[in-house]
Image (tube, grey):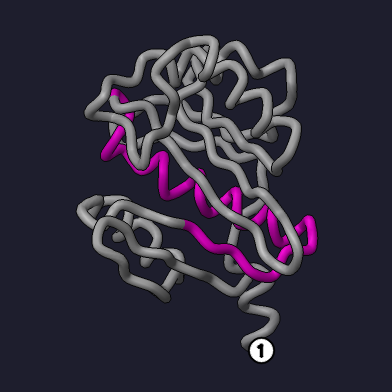
Amino acid sequence: MTDEATAAHRFSRPPRSFTDGRDRAIEIGVADDADSEAVVEMYAAYTDADRAQGIPPRERRDVAEWVDTMLDDGINLVAWHGEDAVGHAALFPYDDTAELVIFVHPDYHYAGIGSRLIRALLGAGQRAGLDHVWLSVQRDNHVAMNLYRSVGFETTRRERNEHEMELDL
């Protein structure tokens, strides 16, 4: 397989089903407006310790507005455990790039959900014709940075409190 063909198949496309590291059935699918309330519920359960770079917002009404904006403006995926949203990831295209955000409910950390969710999101981005993605991550969020590196992101800028990372799809 050529490098170009390998890159084209590097990321899975949603929908995806798998059993996570804690033996829970997880489904990853494309999110739409009908999923808004379940995603808001996921974020409403976040504590201050779960927030990064000021997101998700603290107040429920702000969370709902933020989620609706993401669902309107981006490519969104949700990881489901039964009827519960347990992960959310989105790409926001503009110009020749897209910004990536990803969150996994704290009760579902360290079970492989983030890894599967980000790969499915990048696959959805490829399907949408995106060829470059970037993100910003808190410098001390080593778990997230390791996740991003595992799919090929490279640090392109270091600041006092955060790193910017990029990936060519």
Q: Residue at x 26, y 56 (%)?
A: 161
Helix, strand or loop at disc 1?
A: loop
Left or right, 82 with respect to 14, comes to left
At a point 31% along the width and 58% down the height, the residue shown is 162
Please count the marks in the image: 1
Residue 22 point in image, percent of width and height: 29, 30
Q: Position of residue 103 (x, y in %)?
A: 43, 36
Q: Nearer the viewer, residue 150 or 145?
A: 145
Query: Residue at label 1?
Result: 2
Q: Quadrant of the C terminus?
A: bottom right
The residue sitting at the bottom extreme is: 2
Looking at the image, which residue is at 37% across and 66% down?
149
* Range covered by the magenta-colored residues: 107-135
- Residue 121 covered by magenta stretch: yes
Tell me the residue at 65%/58% (across/down).
98
Q: Residue 37, relative to residue 30: is it above or below? A: above
Considering every residue shown, the one lying at the far front of the view is 160
Is residue 36 within the magenta segment?
no
Residue 60 placement, left or right of 46: right
Whether residue 23 sits left or right of residue 84 in the image: it is left
- At label 1, the amino acid type is Thr
Residue 94 versus residue 79 in the image, above or below: below
x and y percent of residue 139 in the render?
Answer: 25, 57
